[in-house]
Amino acid sequence: MPEIITIGETMAAFTPESTGFLRYVSNYRMRIAGAESNLAIGVCKLGHSAGWVSSLGKDEFGEFVRNSIRAEGVDTSRVVFDPEHRTGIMFKQVRNASETSVFYYREHSAASFMGPDLLDESYLSSARILHLTGITPVLGTNCREMVEAAMDLAVKHGQMISFDPNIRRKLWGDKDFAPMLRDMMMKAQIVLLGADEAQALLGTAEPSEIMDHLFDKGLAEYVAVKDGAKGAYVGSLENTRRDRDGLVRIPAFPCSCVDPVGAGDAFNAAFLCGILEGKDIRECGSMGAVAGALATETYGDTEGYPSQEQMEAAVKGNTMVYR
């Protein structure tokens, strides 16, 4: 059974073969895009096992999404095909390395109709970590109920919950989901969030204040605050109890960025693998930094994610020989 299980929507993603406004683009490549499946793929590339639970339309895009994720070694045995609703679609617009926009066509998608009945308790309870994001519960009331039910099952079976708020303002519309995401985040043992997301949910982007809040008022045992090219701060409850200044700064890993989308999910995947391997918090953070940086060097979300061999070489400061 998978060590890490995650639940969420993955779309067929169309990425342009040239930069600029989409109105001038003629050719696209079809890939996949979904925070949860990105993480599952990243975990498998690093030599661990992951399962992805979702609903897809019973259409060609759904088959493409499932096959693409399964080809990376992810267990997709709990994916269902919905004959009444379609697979979500998105288009990516790349102006330059620092400006990427996405356009969603996911309203009434199969995944937006996921509910608690999708959950297989015996399957979910087999994992060591349940990873969830703040994207899924804003897709609809039934999706929120499913995420809450999954968290309840994790608590029932003594599993660690990993949570990334993954704020998507385009999905929020005119609603404020901050209180809901904050409540979910406070129930997680592993919290992975961006500095901007911390500002939105906790009112501060200061790493020490974020960790004080999550360790003292929540259930967090591990926290990572990601800040793009500025690097990250990581901390653990164990370190904090020993040393109130126990947070660790993780510098950004050198890279040649062409597209930052997917970097946060790569960081999360590697960070969780570090926890599974019993590494200390600095090592977990360093693994996350390597994966996040390498993810930005390709236009697809997961194509740049490192293998276990690449990760080991990068962490040790070695150079891979390719010829």
Image (cartoon, grey):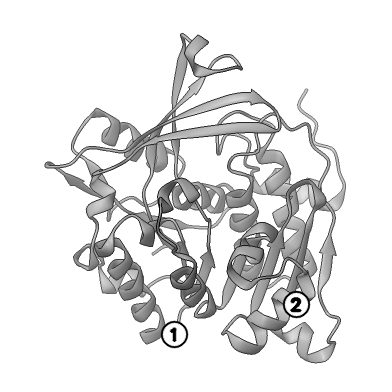
Q: Residue furthest front?
A: 174
Determine which quarter of the picture holds residue 69: top left
SS class of the residue under badge 1? loop
Which residue is at 64% across, 69% downward? 275
Identify the residue under disc 2. 209
Q: Estimate the x, y position of residue 49 in percent, counting from the top left.
A: 48, 57
Answer above or below: position of 67 versus 283: above
Instruction: Name the secondary structure under disc 2.
Output: helix
> Which of the pair 147/208 is nearer the observer?
208
| Residue sitting at the far left | 84
Residue 46 appears in the rendering? no
**Label tally:** 2
Mark 2: which amino acid? Glu
Instruction: From the viewer's perspective, tell me whether residue 211 is left or right of residue 282.
Output: left
Up/down of 179 relative to 168, above or below: below
Residue occupied by mark 1? 158
